[in-house]
Image: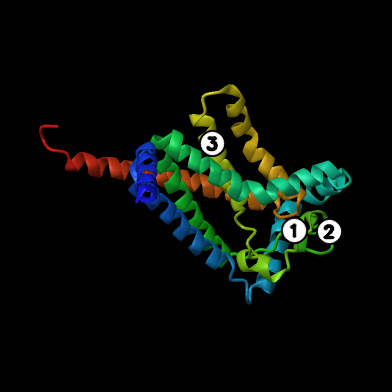
Amino acid sequence: MTTIRAVRGLVARIGRWLPQGWGDAGLQVGLFVLADLCYETVRGVAEGQRAEAFANAGRVIDIEVATGTFFEPDLQAALIGQQWVIEAANFAYMNSHFVLTTGFLAWLYLRRNEHFYFVRNMFMVAMALALVGYTLVPTAPPRLVEGYGFVDTINQYSEVNHESALVQMFINPYAAIPSMHCAFALMVGGTGLLVSRHTISKVFWAVYPLIVLLVVMITANHFWLDAAIGWAVAGLSALAALQLARVREAWTFGRRPATA
């Protein structure tokens, strides 16, 4: 009984520490889990998309060549001999998307709770747009495109096999458009820049989207055009979240008593 009371007391204390209590925290976790399940399910459906995915990758290359911006092979070739750069890029690619993003969202919920719900809505809209992109425009990443000298640095230097059954359960190799690494980085970086209170952290969040852009190109997981579309998704998501906030504010105002 003493142990049960201690556990209940601990749960109650944590609940009082949470900005909106256990109920709201559980709701937010549930929303992100549900969104991620949908995201990973659609993202993992790669059957029958190979030919279309490589055709779309070819179109991306054609657009970049036509505009004189097909620089990714030269960029990777210039840096591939720098072991520390490749290892740092691999580490950032494998950890920034989920570890840093999840950590930032948790910090935002706990320490800047008034801003969390807007950002949550941005993420929900962005993930929905990504599902549409993956379904309608399956696209192979540079690392799978032959003939241009791209190196799959994750496979060759980090001993993570993209072709393994376990990895393919969670990763659709034909989900390059939009680059959600870049979309998430811009949403997190922009928010961090606005809500941080220290110069060093503001500088970090300001350059973070550019770091992720460099990382996805060095590792040959995205063309710059994939990243640009990812940034566009982030922008559209911010506009959608702003509209949702306005609708909610109008609805809340309309429900207030006349004396208020």
The Cα–Cα distance between marks 3 and 2, rounded to whole angstroms, is: 34 Å
Disc 3 residue type?
Gly
Q: Which residue is depicted at the point 21% across and 39% down?
A: 253
The Cα–Cα distance between marks 1 and 3, rounded to whole angstroms, is: 27 Å
Q: Is residue 109 left or right of residue 222?
A: left
Decide which of 175, 202 is in the foreground and name it.
202
Which of the two discs, 1 and 3, labels the residue nearer the N terminus? 1
According to the image, label 1 marks what residue? Answer: 142
Q: Nearer the viewer, mark 3 or mark 2?
A: 3
Where does residue 47 sit, x and y in percent of width and height?
62, 75
Q: Are marks 2 and 1 in contact (CB under 8 Å)?
A: yes
According to the image, label 3 marks what residue? Answer: 190
Disc 2 residue type?
Tyr
Decide which of 54, 101 is in the foreground and name it.
101
Q: Is residue 231 visible?
A: no
The Cα–Cα distance between marks 2 and 1, rounded to whole angstroms, is: 9 Å
According to the image, label 2 marks what residue? Answer: 148
Q: Nearer the viewer, mark 1 or mark 3?
A: 3
- Helix, strand or loop at label 2? It is loop
Decide which of 156, 68 is in the foreground and name it.
156
Total label count?
Answer: 3
- Helix, strand or loop at label 3? It is helix
